[in-house]
Image (spheres, grey):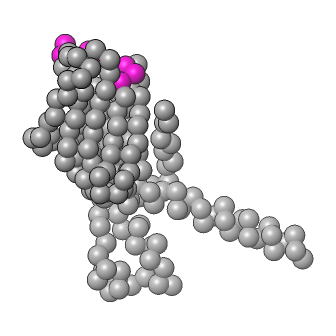
Amino acid sequence: MKTRIAGYCAAGLLFFLPGLWGQGEAVNARLVGTVLDPAEAPVPQAKVTLKSAETGFARQFLTDADGGYIFTQISPGRYELGVEKPGFATYLQTEVVLTVGQSAGLNLRLEIGALSQVIEVEADAPLLNSGRPDLGAEVSGKQAVELPLNIRNVYNLVGLSSAVNSNTEYQGLT
């Protein structure tokens, strides 16, 4: 009897968990881009740092051979994006705003300079979504209360967003 119950529980988890994995894209954001030098050549192994002063969140990523970086499963909010590479001036962009379900692209150009030189960008650079046509949506408290939900399960509200899928993405660690 215990084996049968355990088997039903395991089967239920296997059925339920894949739906939760896809919900990350509906409530989080993603930031991708390429780090380039002044001649528009990719800069490999540059240290890209994404930080939030509001939450204390910080994540680092080394660019790949093509100068690319990607931050996935990022909570919506205001961030600061910095890039460091020996032989280049440190790049710092403040006020990078990511929203729910957004897949933003931000290509960065480093300037040749001393290691102690910092170039701070204060203008808003446009966040482009050229790679993925995702759309996101926020569900208000009023909608959560007033929309008809099957068994009053608030997780069913996640399915209202077109950004919901069951793909899993992994963040590279440095």
- The quarter holding residue 127 reads top left
User: Which residue is located at x 41 percent, y 28 percent?
Assistant: 62
Q: Main secondary structure of the magenta part?
A: loop
Q: Nearer the viewer, residue 90 or 145?
A: 90
In the image, residue 75 above or below residue 40: below
User: Which residue is located at x 26 percent, y 20 percent?
Assistant: 115
Residue 9 coordinates in the image, percent (x, y): 74, 70
Q: Going by the image, does 164 lie left or right of 173?
A: left
Q: Going by the image, does 92 lie left or right of 4?
A: left
Q: Nearer the viewer, residue 129 or 106?
A: 106
Residue 90 coordinates in the image, percent (x, y): 24, 27
Confirm whether the magenta stretch covers residue 96: no
Q: Nearer the viewer, residue 41 or 49?
A: 49
Quadrant for the N terminus, please. bottom right
Look at the image and give the residue range highlighted in magenta. Answer: 38-46
Residue 25 coordinates in the image, percent (x, y): 40, 54
In the orientation shown, which residue stands out farthest toward the front?
116
In the image, residue 171 above or below residue 112: below
User: Which residue is located at x 72 percent, y 65 percent?
Assistant: 11
User: Which residue is located at x 40 percent, y 21 percent?
Assistant: 45
